[in-house]
Amino acid sequence: MLSYQDMTESERELYDKVKNASGELTLKASQLGSAEAQAIAEALKVNTTLTQLHLMDNQIGDIGAQAMAEALKVNTKVTQLYLGTNQIGHGGAQAIAEALKVNTTLNDLDLGENMIGDIGAQAMAEALKVNTTLDYLDLSVNQIGDTGATAIVEALKANTTVTLIDLHENQIGDAGAQAIAEAVKVNNTLTMLYMDQNFLTEAGITSLRQTGNAECKVDFDEYPLATQRVPSPADFQSAARAAANATIEHLQLRSKLAAKGQELTAKDQELSAKDQELQQLRSDLAAKDQALAAKDQELQQLRSDLAAKDLELKSALERIDELEPAIDGPITQVPLATLATATNNFAAESLLGEGAFGRVYGAFMPGTHVAIKRLSAESKQGAVEFKSELDSLSKFRHANIIAILSYAEEGDERCLVYEYMPNGSVRDRLSRKNDTPPLAWSQRQRIATDVSRGMHYVQTAFPDHALFHLDLKTDNVLLDAHFNAKVSDFGLVRAAQHLDEKSYLRTQNVQGTMAYMCPEFLIEGRMTIKTDVHAFGMILLELVTAAKAGPRQKSEARKAVKNQKFADMVDSTLKPTEAELQNVSELVTLALECLDEAADERPSFGAIIASLDP
């Protein structure tokens, strides 16, 4: 296959011309060779509007014809293809014949005035036995003899669509003509057969005229059947060469068969030795199976123990999951110098990571380990976003919302001090940053539940208005020492008064991460209480696959739900049990509900919690 990148400039121009063509396109007498034909063929694979293609009077050979054949296997629009007066031989004809076996649209095929002999004609005959659309076939001015003609007419006994065959100016003799006459007697479809300028004598001409089939015309005013050629010495020499070549090919084939026989004997000996090795391997495998069975029992016990621990942890989480009351007073403001001292003047060795809104440093302050997010005048998070995040996080406390401890603001310098999350972001753990072990399936399920609880609180903590996070993603979900998940980065939070499931708020300043944005927010700037639900759906797919967010994830999830095959999309580091695969299917189905194009069809976070933690 010739790729667009490997084409020359002229071939690319030809490709583009054919790709964008519609209806009829004529490229006759354009000095096109096989390389150009390959470019044309690649364009035909993607064109959906071209119906007629004229490529007569060029220099297209077998390689070009083979490329055109591959295009005919997939193209469903071209009905007429003219390849007359080129340099196509047996190889090209055989390839086109194979394509005709699967092509369902081609009606007219012109291969006249090429170099096709009996081998190519026999291949075309096999195609005619199964093709159900071809109506017109031109094989005139080629090198087809009685063998090729006989094969074609045998195919005509089964074919019910071809109405015209042009075989004039070939090398067909009386034997071929008599075979054709017998086929015409039983064929009810063929109406026009051109046989002039062949090697027929009166006997062959008479047999064609006396078929008894009045529907099939063999004599024409311009091309009378009686106009035949007398074989010249060159023709006899050509026939002799063909016979000699056939004999040589036969001898070569016998020699190859003998060599293959010797190879097979050697292979049999090798297989016998391999069979002995296989018996030994089977014995070894049986021993391994016994060892694995013992290990499997140990694994089942470990899973049982882990499930019990999970239940204990879930019970503990439920006990601390009560919503904490809002803080009455403001968050403590600390001097910037205090934070500079704690981070050794924001030294590189204290740096934990860097995001769109600033750098995050680890530090120890009196009594606790903290994370300090430092913003500057050049940061994408300006004063408005800083105040938004400070205001949002100062109003509530929840087990699944990152806790802000203090802040500093001096001139253009702004810092927020959070509780330290030693296991980093969910995205880092899914990507196994710094070669960390993969998250277990039970941990991923708990993360999904934690995020839904945190977001439900964000949307319902204040009865008089709803909050939108607008940048919910795995990078902004952090994990504590016990892998409990907490939502962070509230710099884009927006509030709306008295918003129900049918209402929305509009903004002209769309910010966030595109892969997580729902259509109505990305295109129209419309925010609803279901906007963050869409982002949560993408997070669910990331937890299942470990792949980064993107449209491909949604497409693969739909395919998995349709085919009920979820194992292929699961993170390869996981080896889920049957029960866990059932959990995967439920989580993927929920994710697609959250990712619904229509906001009204997405579940609320309250419904999501009920689904994840019934």
Image (cartoon, rainbow, N blue to C red):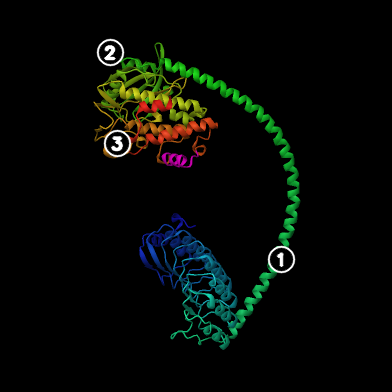
Decide which of 37, 182 is in the foreground and name it.
Answer: 182
Q: Which residue does the numbered mark 2 point to in the structure image?
A: 328
The image quadrant of residue 4 is bottom left
Q: Residue at 73% across / 37% down in the picture? A: 283
Residue 503 belongs to the span the image colors magenta: no
Q: Amino acid at mark 3?
A: Phe
- The answer, for residue 30, to whether it is visible in the render is yes
Which residues are drawn in magenta? Answer: 553-565
Q: Residue at 75% across / 56% down in the picture? A: 265
Q: Quadrant where the C terminus lies?
A: top left
The percent coordinates of residue 507 (x first, y second) are: 24, 34
- The answer to whether residue 498 is above or below residue 538 is above
From the viewer's perspective, tell me whether residue 285 is left or right of residue 139.
Answer: right
The percent coordinates of residue 600 (x first, y second) are: 31, 35
Q: Which residue does the numbered mark 1 point to in the structure image?
A: 255
Mark 2 or mark 3, earlier in chain: 2
Mark 2 or mark 1, earlier in chain: 1
Q: Amino acid at mark 1?
A: Ser
